[in-house]
Amino acid sequence: MNENQNPIAGLLQENQFIGWTCALDFEKAVVVTSDQLKARAHGVPLHCFLLATTFDPQKSAGANVGDAVLLRVIGSAPLPLDDTLLQTRVENLKERVLQISPSDSPRNEFQFGGLACRILGTFYIKDGRLRLGSDVENYFSAAELAVYRPTGTALELIVNYISPERAAAVEEEARRLGLPGAMPSFPIGTVRYSSTDRLHRGEDAGQAAFNLNATDFLARRTAIFGMTRTGKSNTVKQLVSVVVRTSAECRLKIGQIIYDLNGEYANANQQDKGSIAEVFPDETVRYRMIPTPGFQPILNNFFTQIAEGHHTLRGLIEMNRVSRSADIDAFLNMEFAEPRKEDFENETGYQHQLVRYQRKIAAYLAMIARAGFEPPPNFKITFEAGPSVKNKVNPVIDPANGLTPDQAFEWFQLARQIQDELVTGTGQNWVEPDTNVLMNMLLQKNDQGAYIPGFRVLQPFKDYHAPNRKTDVCDEIYQHLLAGRIVILDLSVGNPGQRERLSKRIARHILASSMEVFNAGQTPPNIVIYVEEAHNLIGKHEPLTEIWPTIAKEGAKARLATVYATQEVSSIHPNILSNTENIFCAHLNNENEINELAKYYDFRDFAKTIIRAQDVGFGRMKTLSNPFVIPVQIDKFDPERERARKG
């Protein structure tokens, strides 16, 4: 295309002419074509794009090209030969076709047919720039628009078109992030109309690349739908790669966290020939719920994250249906929140309650140590006993100076032996009810002195404790994300209930931390959250106050992007779906799921082919920049190619 040529002329390819419109309104069009013209254009498959215009490429250099209406083929259309006026027009168009493509065959009459098309919009020129409206401004009943099927470069221009307004918004977003130019776009697939792709994607047909704009993806919501083994995971890996390349090209730190329910991103498998962790080893940190070489523990240190450790134990005891007693029930109902000064009228009341709280914590720590939970090196249990209690239990050892777990056990054991004397000597019960329950479990005796299993009920859950962790795992993960790393939570092993709870806790921490930055008037970090098998984590009936609907509503301003993949459109919370800007859908086998998807954008046009075509990676994609759905064959994630890009 020369610099003086109207950009619309560059979309029209003379050898791709397929016929004329014989009917046109604001929503749809009917195109008259022939077998010969369709063959010359390498076929006109269902859902292919067409351009209808009054411009003739043979008669003009293109300087004065008018508008071009963008169509999508949605089926066949019977030609209206029963209407005299329309019949005359169709006959006239047939004669014009025969002038272009003459034939001696007497069966020409049977070579003509109609294509039913949906109007997607209008390409036009305004202020010297190419624009695409989402409708037609006017139409003429008598108009006979020439119709072309764009291919190659022309098709690439159509499917990758970005409006001037959207382009300006992208540039403004880049400036706000301190980038020298707009965020890049990367090819992730090629246009594919049908499962049978011998003609429109053959050797003689130029394939059109579809590019994903990084700005469409960051701080946005993206849904990936499809049956098992139809390309969902491959699409996620492509998105991870796009983010890595965007981060490198823009020198912008973008953290990524993958909720990996099947372990396929953290570990290589024979089907996918490579995991994210293998392709990006320097950028990736992996977490698991059980100790595994090469993985960080996803759980916390029960001796330092006390409330979280107790919450974990409570969930495990309830889910494993441990035999219950009065002491176990009391233990499950405990709270470990530290007293706050503002809740007390004076300092004396606060200090008194703080001492009681410290004794409660001391008994708890001694109990879990007795159950075999490994304490950190040189760990000491510290609490105030009071002069009278300290002298009666053991005048030589002062708990305020710190006790080893074994010493703490012995101290509480001695205290229980003389408990009646302590009550008499102090004039009051020196331990609160919760501390008394914890002492019962530590010493394996209830208030009546009868044997109880006590701390032994906790022993099966020792693997959920991370003795070497010094900080809260949620904060550690967030720091990795701030550094622009890929965090993979391998949730394929471990207790399902704990998996769900920890998943939400980490997501809640990420949102809270990023919102804190936002509320301080600063730009939050860019973070992308991937949720595989999303129906297991994002329930349809979740209250709007739960973390995943909250992220869907507020995540964008905190610069959190959410990518969720599932087989079931209907299982996703409607609030999340309603706030989703990007949708990729491969094969679905259920009309109910198709009908749910059809509520969004123009996916209804593809309902029949989505349920019929099962080709891996063949999907339909709607992105923020694209005003309509585009059928795309997603490129196969190639570990060797990704490594070559890095090297």
Image (cartoon, helix red, strand yellow):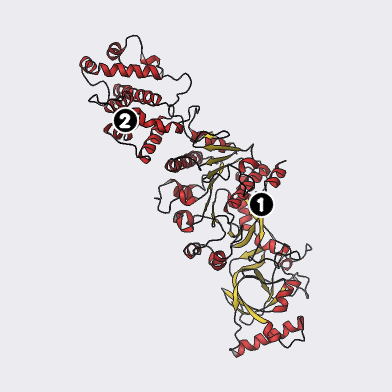
List x then y, in percent, for residue 429. Answer: 23, 21
Does label 2 or label 1 sit earlier along the sequence?
1
Whether pointer 2 and pointer 1 mark residues with C-beta atoms closer than 8 Å, the reply is no
Label at residue 335: none
Outermost residue to the top: 396
Q: Amino acid at mark 2?
A: Asp
Q: Quadrant of residue 559?
A: top right
Amino acid type of disc 1?
Answer: Ser
**At 44% from the left edge and 54% from the top edge, which residue is drawn?**
573
On residue 185, the disc is 1
Q: Quadrant of the C terminus?
A: top right
18 and 500: which one is in front?
500
Please give the residue where the numbered disc 2 appears in the rendered image.
Answer: 343
How many numbered discs sit on the rendered protein?
A: 2
Residue displayed at 32% across by 27% down: 441
- Does residue 294 appear anywhere in the picture? yes
Q: Is residue 519 above or below residue 233?
A: above
Which residue is depicted at the point 35% across and 19% down?
409
| Nearest the eye: 24 or 593 | 593
